[in-house]
Image (cartoon, grey):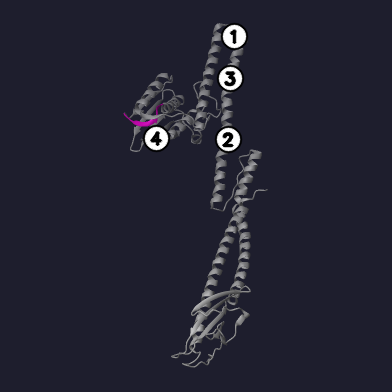
Amino acid sequence: MKKLSIKLKITLWYTIVMMLISGVVLAVMTSATQEMIERDISERIIKNVMDFSRVLGGPGNRDIQIPKFGFYNQGVHMIVYDDDNNIVAGNIPFEIDIPSELIDNNMQTIVENRNKYYIYTLKVRHKGGNSTPYWIKGIASVTDDMYAVNTATKTNLILTVILIIIAAAGGYFIIGRALFPVTKIRNTAERISESRDLSQRITIGGGKDEIHELANTFDNMLDKLEHTFEREKQFTSDASHELRTPVAVILSECEYMTDCAKTYDEIKESAYSVKNQAEKMSKLISELLTISRMDKNTIQTEFEEVDISELLNFVCDEQAEIQAENIQLHRNIEPDIVANADRFLLVRLFINLISNAYRYGKDGGNITVSLHRNKDSINASIADDGIGIAESDIPKIWERFYQVNPSRTSSENGGVGLGLSMVKWIAECHGGSMSVKSTLGAGSTFTFSMPAR
């Protein structure tokens, strides 16, 4: 059996609910109306019998004085009996069998030929006399009064069914319109699955309900997925490019050593070149693995109380010792700044920033490392007076493998464009951020900020 669509399920559901509610309302209204009619008949028959009894005759007079309204009034038939249960006046209406019992002030109900009747019996004595009493029976048909109610109920039932059908058809149409974005989402997902084209969008405008918000969320998700896949494609392409160069150099040097080198010095020089390229590949592979763990969020972090002032001084000492450039490193580090941080990741962040300052600084230039704390944050900045960064390139420097050099090739001491993307991730991992101010040809200042907690 074919599964029902959502809009058909919803339509069937509220149609059934409407039918149940309408049925209950009609049943309650019919029952209440019937009860009111029967109560009205009961009160009316008692009142008419009472009125009839007051004018039957005077004191001591056994002659029946017929009231001016006769033996029928307001749908009530009256019959007069003597004490021996003989009819003195009036006729039995509706050709029904009336119970013969004479019980004073008694209301009886009988059903004959599917018709319901009320019979009220009352004992009447002459005023001030001792003569034989009369008995009056009032008879009224409940079925006659209920006929109009039953007719109205049938009419209401037919109208209710018609209204439910109209409401169901209208609801089906409205639900179809409301779920139209869902159909577009499904169709778009199918097209993307078949074509693997993440550039397709649902693009539903004009609405602000939950379905339209879902469609917009889906479009935003596709934007991020497309951007992520493009980054991954670019990442793979750049990684291949960066690995291809040292591999080509290694192969070339090995061929030279085996085919062309004739002296020990030539072989040694080629071996050093192979070693340098292998080290560069090892560093690149290590950074690629780190980037991969960052993307998968599998890097284990160990936050603890860290003396950031001491840590930054240590990194400055190390960098000043290992860097060969003729650049002066100056410090403006506020002492005893302690925060909850991952020691290893902060060391990596400071090393990347300071080594970049050396790498892109100018001969005889200066680097200033600063650290201070205010009420809400801890701020570290690394400023140089080197080559600087063009304003158009600043938003791109956090991208992987991006280098200001358009050729995207690394120099002898250059990097491969992964350091700043790691720096940005480490800053965000600490709940902080990175910012940069730079002027082309005048230097750059990188600032790391994190919460002071």
Distance Cα–Cα, label 3 vs label 4: 40 Å
Q: Which mark is residue 261?
A: 1
Q: Select label 3 or label 2 by which is in front.
A: 2
- For the record, the magenta segment spans 336-343
Q: Position of residue 443 (x, y in %)?
A: 44, 30
Residue type indicated by callout 4: Met
Residue 387 image position (x, y, % from top left): 46, 28
Q: CA distance from mark 2 to mark 4?
A: 30 Å
Q: Which mark is residue 450?
A: 4
Q: Name the residue beneath numbered marker 2.
A: 229
Who comes first in sequence, dot 3 or dot 2?
Answer: 2
Whether residue 341 is in magenta: the answer is yes
**Which kind of residue does numbered mark 1 sit on?**
Ala
| Dot in front, 3 or 4 | 4
Q: Is residue 87 above or below residue 411?
A: below
Say what amino acid the circle numbered 2 marks.
Phe
Q: Give the SS element for disc 4.
A: strand
Q: Position of residue 359 (x, y in %)?
A: 46, 24
**As shown in the figure, which amino acid type bears the numbered disc 3?**
Val
Between marks 1 and 4 in the image, the one whose residue lies nearer the viewer: 4
Task: Give the answer, above or below, for where 352 lies relative to 453.
Answer: above
Q: Quadrant of the C terminus?
A: top left
N-term mark: 2 or 4: 2
**Mark 1: few/some/many CA within 10 Å (<14, 14-19, 20+):** some
Q: Earlier in the sequence, mark 3 or mark 4?
A: 3
Front residue of this view, candidates 76 and 81: 81
Q: Position of residue 145 (x, y in %)?
A: 58, 76
Instruction: Report the number of discs.
Output: 4
